[in-house]
Image (tube, grey):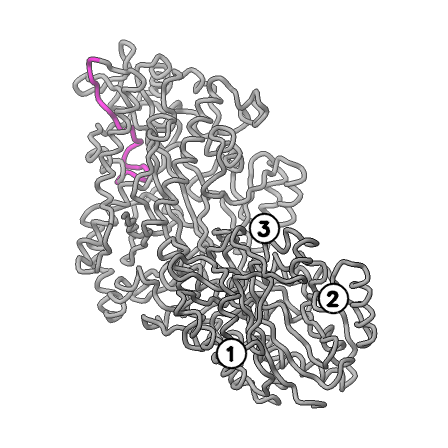
Amino acid sequence: MTAELTLGAEEELHLIDRERRTLSASAPQLLSRLPSESFSAELQRTTIETNTPVVTGLGALREELVSLRKQLIAVADPEGIGIAAVGTAPSSYDEDFELTASGRFGRMQQQYRLLVDEQLICGTQIHVGVSDRDLAVDIAQRIGRDLPILLALSASSPYWNGQDTGYASIRTILWQRWPTTGVLPPLGSAKEYDALIESLVQSGVIADAKMAYFDVRPSSHVPTLELRVSDACPVVDDAILVAGLFRAMVRSAELDIERGVPYVPVAAPLQRAATWQAARAGLSGTLLDPTTHAERVPAPGVVRSLIERLRPALEELGDYEEVAELAARTLVQGTSADRQRAAYAESGSLDDVMDQVVAETQGPPSGLPADVPALGAYPARAGDEAIGLGSRPRPVYSDVISYVRERSRDDLEKLQDQRDAWSDDEGLTVVLNGETNRFDVDLVPRIVIAHEWAMLRDGLEQRARALEMFLQDIYGAGRVIADGVVSESDLVACPGWRDDARRLPKSVVRAPIMGFDLVRDERGEWRVLEDNLRNPSGLAYAAAAREMLDAVVPDMPRPAGLVDPHASLPVVGQTLRACVERAGVGVGDEGALVLLATGPSSVAWYEHQRLAKESGLELATSEDLVVRDGRVRLVDGDRAVDGIYVRLDDEIGALQTEDGRALGEEIVDVAAAGAVVLANAPGNGVADDKATYRLVPELIGYYLGERPLIESVPTYRTDDEDERRIVLERVGELVTKPVDGYGGNGVLVGPLASEGEIARRRMEIAGSQEGWVAQETVSLSSHPTLDHGRLEPRHVDLRVFVHVTGTEPGQVQAIPVGLTRVAGPRSLIVNSSQGGGAKDTWILQD
C-alpha cells in the first residue's frame, strides 16, 4: 500500500419538529451552540452537516459518527427537534424549503431555481485518503462501475412530497439533475482534472470546484477521494458498511494500477442505467451486473459477489469480517427504504415513518433491537405479506405466527387433517375437469389492515362506477364511441359483445355484482389484475373459510376490528332487489328473486347453493323456469320472477331445457321488455375483456374526471402491430392470456414456461392476432402457507366484490369480504379452477 488509506465522513442530517413531524428550519439556532469545526450549515436551513476528523479504521469512524450525532441531539432535543439521517424526510414538502442566508447559497438559488428549491435531500459522503492526486483521479474512474451497489445499500428515500415515489432512492433522481453529477470522464492526471473544473467554472455553469458533484470526487487540494452517491444512512452501521466497501474498492483499484491492469471504461449510458436501477430497486429487486452492466441480477447476489471480489483488499485492510457481517445483516434487515415502507404498511401514516427514522438515527449504531424473534426456518422473500424484514413477523401477524410456531409439526398436521374432515362434512367442494374436489383452505389467515382496506374500497368503488357507466354507454347512447375513446368496430369485435344487450331498458344496472382480482407486488403496491363482470365467484367460499377456521382453530388470536364475512351474504339478495326496484319490475306484486345455475356439474355448485339459501334467493336450473304471459316464472308454484342472478357456466342466451327449448333466448326477450332484471346482464363480457382492461384507467378519467386510485398491470394488445412485435419478442418475459379467457385458462407465465411452450404461444399469437393480450409479469406477494405441517411461502391474490345499484357514489359499495386465492408450489397462477387453494381473509376496519 503506497499510503495509509485514511477515512472520514460527512453526514447531512434533517432537523425534524418532533411534535408536528415536519422539517424544522432551526439550523442557525442549533449551530450557534455547536463547534464549527465539526458542524456546518447546508443549503437549506432544515439540515445540518457533521464532519468527522480523519481516522484510520472503521471502528474509529463509527465512534466519531456516534459522538457527533450525540452532540447534535444534546442541543436539539431540548428544543423538541429530532434528527433524521435519510435521503428525504418522509413527510417533507417543497414548501418546507428555507434557504440558508449566505451569498453563495443565494447565488445558487438565483441561478438554479427549482433545483435549489427542491433540494430537501441528504447524503452521506465518505472520504478516503490516498498517496497523491494523480492516483486519486485514476482510481475515481476505475471504481465507477461498482458505485451503484453502494447506492443500493444506502437507499433511504422512498418518499417525496408525502408520497411513495416507487424508488428506493428518490434523492438520487433529484440529485442527478445537477449539471456535474455522474462518473468522471476519461482523464489522465490531476492536471487534466483541474483543467476540467476550471473550464466548468469559466463556463458559468458552476460557481466553484465544490459544485463538481461527481459520484466520486477527487479533491482539488489534497489527495483524497470523496464518495457522493450514498443516501444518508439512519443506522450508523449502514454508513460504516458503505465506508468499508468504498475503501476496499479504492485499495483494489490501487492494486490493479500497481499490477498494470488497464482501465476499461463503462459506457456512460450503461453506467447511468445501473445507477438508475439501483435508485429504483435498492436491495428489493435487481441490479445491473457491474461486470457487464447489461444483465439484471438479484441485488443480494450482486452484493455478495462484490464482497468476494474485494476480499483480498478487505483482508489486507483488516475489514473483511466486519464488512461481511454488516452486509449479511443489511441483506436480512433490508435498507432504510425497505424499513420505512414496512412501517407505513402497518399504519398508513407517514408520521409513524418519520418517528421510525428519527428513532433509528438517534438509536444504537447497529439499529433498533427487534421486538419479535426471527422465523428461522421460513424461506423469507421480498414481498412476503406476513414475514417482513429480518425474517420477523409483521406486528399485525405476530399473534397468528406465534400460534403456529408454538405447535409441533405433528400437531399442525393433525389440524390440517381436522380441516379436511370439516370440509368433507360441510361439502366444501369445487368441480375441476368434471370431478368434484375438496376446496382447500389454509389454516394461516391473510390480514388486510384497516388503512389498506380503505384504500382498496375507494379504488374499487371508483373502478366499478366507471365500468357500469361504460356498459350503459356502449349499449345505449354511445357517447364514448362518438368521442373517439373507443371504436365501435373494436367493441363489436370483442368476444363478449352481445347485440341483444342493446335491447335492455336504459334503467337497468348491467353489472350489479362485480369481482376484482388484485395482486400486490414485492414493494407492497396493489394492482388490479383482472375485472370480472360476468359471474364472479368466491363470496360463499370466503364465508366458509372463516367457518372452517372458527371450527378448527377457535383459539387462534383474532385482532380487533375483524369483519364477519357472513354479514355480506344477504347483501346479494338486497342488491338484486334494489336493482329490480330501480327498473320498476313487479311493482305492486313482488315476485321471486332467483339464482340461476347450471346445476351440480358447475364449478361453484357449493357456492350457488349457499348463496341462494343465505341471500333469500330461489335456487333454479333451466328445468325450474318457464316463460309464460310475458314473465319468467317458477315451474313450481307459477310465481313470477322479478330478478335473476345469473351464475351459469355459459351465456344465458345459450341456455336450453332438456327438451331443447331455447329458454335463454326467451328470458332475454322478457328482460328486453323490462319484465325481469338479469344480474349480470348479457354483453358484460366486453367490459372484462382482457383487451378492454387496459382502457379502464382512461375510462375512469373519461366518465369520472379522476385518476385511478388503484393502478392496472401494463398490458399489450397483440392486434396492434407495434405491440405485437414487442410481445412476440418477449413472450418468455410476459404473461400471455386469451382476451376472453377466465379461470386461469390459457394463461402462460413466460418466466416459468419451457422453450417449447414459449414457441407454441408465439405461433398461437401469430395465428390469431386479435385473440391475445400480454401483461408485464408481476412478482406477486407471498404468504406463509402450511404444507404438511411446515410453513412455506405461496403466491396469493385477492378477489373483492363490489355491489352496484346505480352509478352515483352512494350506489356503489365494496363489500368488506375477500377471497384470498393461493397458488401451488412454484406457480404464479392463483385460481381455484387451476387447482389452487384459498385462505380466510381477515379484513380489519376501524
Q: Are marks 2 and 1 in contact (CB under 8 Å)?
A: no
Quarter of the rendering containing residue 97: bottom right
Q: Nearer the viewer, residue 443 or 382?
A: 382
Mark 3: few/some/many CA within 10 Å (<14, 14-19, 20+): many
Q: Position of residue 195 (x, y in %)?
A: 83, 70
Q: Amino acid at mark 1?
A: Leu
Ranked by sequence position, the earlier of labels 3 and 1 is 1
Q: Nearer the viewer, residue 141 or 735?
A: 141
Quickly name the residue at label 2.
Answer: 208
Ranked by sequence position, the earlier of labels 3 and 2 is 2
Q: Secondary structure at mark 2?
A: loop
Q: CA distance from mark 3 to mark 1?
A: 54 Å
Q: Secondary structure at mark 1?
A: helix
Q: CA distance from mark 3 to mark 2?
A: 57 Å
The answer to whether residue 589 is magenta is yes
Q: Is residue 562 in sight in this rendering?
A: yes
Disc number for residue 598? none
* Closer mark to the observer between disc 3 and disc 1: 1
Q: Position of residue 62 (x, y in %)?
A: 51, 81
Q: Which residues are magenta?
A: 588-606
Quickly name the residue at label 1.
Answer: 65
Quickly name the residue at label 3.
Answer: 758
Q: Amino acid at mark 2?
A: Asp
* Closer mark to the observer between disc 3 and disc 2: 2
Q: CA distance from mark 2 to mark 1?
A: 28 Å
